[in-house]
Image (spheres, rainbow, N blue to C red):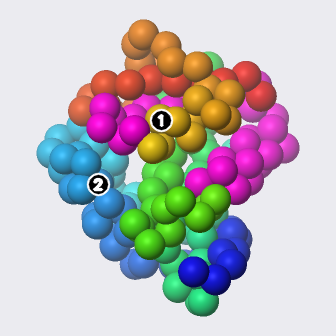
Amino acid sequence: MSDFTIRPIEARDDSKMAQVIRTVMPEFGATGDGFAINDPEVDWMSKAYAEPRCAYFVVEVDGKVLGGGGVAPLAGGDPGVCELRKMYFLPALRGQGAGAAMMTRCLDAARKIGFRQCYLETLSGMDAAMRLYERSGFRRISCSMGNTGHGGCDSFYIRDL
């Protein structure tokens, strides 16, 4: 695989990111109520993350969007806490270092925005993602924070910025 590029999402990326999310989430059984696959913003990510204190990035290889990830304020949470959101990669991108690079980009954006902590929710079985979170300084916590609406998630992490 050739080198990847990480850049801010644009409106032209919306349908591709929706396709990435709708491809990856079923791979891990995350299809019913309480999962991000059903969030309305999946179809208009560029608009959703153009809001204040939000950032979303896509990963491109040879001009094709193969993944993305972003940060936004934690819904119903402390204003100093952001949530790492909708970080998904197609299988062809995995194992190439894109996850670590995207994590760095998202955490840098969160710091620049002024967040003090970053929270995330995930699902048992997403083992590679969980290893990435732990390598990136996230620590597991026992319960969810805020009001994300993702009741299907069962693993929760936080990291100081």
Taking the spot 57% from the left edge, 80% from the top edge, the residue there is 1
The furthest residue to the right: 112
Is residue 159 something that shows in the picture? yes
**Number of residues whose C-alpha sits closer than 10 Å to that of mark 2, classed few (under 14), some (14–19) or many (20 or more):** some
**Number of residues whose C-alpha sits closer than 10 Å to that of mark 1, classed few (under 14), some (14–19) or many (20 or more):** many
Taking the spot 32% from the left edge, 60% from the top edge, the residue there is 24
Tell me residue 56's x, y (percent). 61, 59
Give the number of the disc on residue 25: 2
Say which element carries label 1: helix
Position of 92 relative to 61 (above/below): above
Is 95 left, or right, of 34 in this rendering? right
Is 159 left, or right, of 21 in this rendering? right
Instruction: Identify the amino acid type marked 1.
Output: Met
Magenta stretch in the rendered image: 99-127
Is residue 146 something that shows in the picture? no
Does the magenta-highlighted stretch encompass residue 149? no
**Mark 1 highlights which residue?**
130
Is 134 left, or right, of 34 in this rendering? right
The quarter of the displayed image where residue 46 is located? bottom right
The furthest residue to the bottom: 62
Counting residues from the start of the chain, the first of labels 2 and 1 encountered is: 2
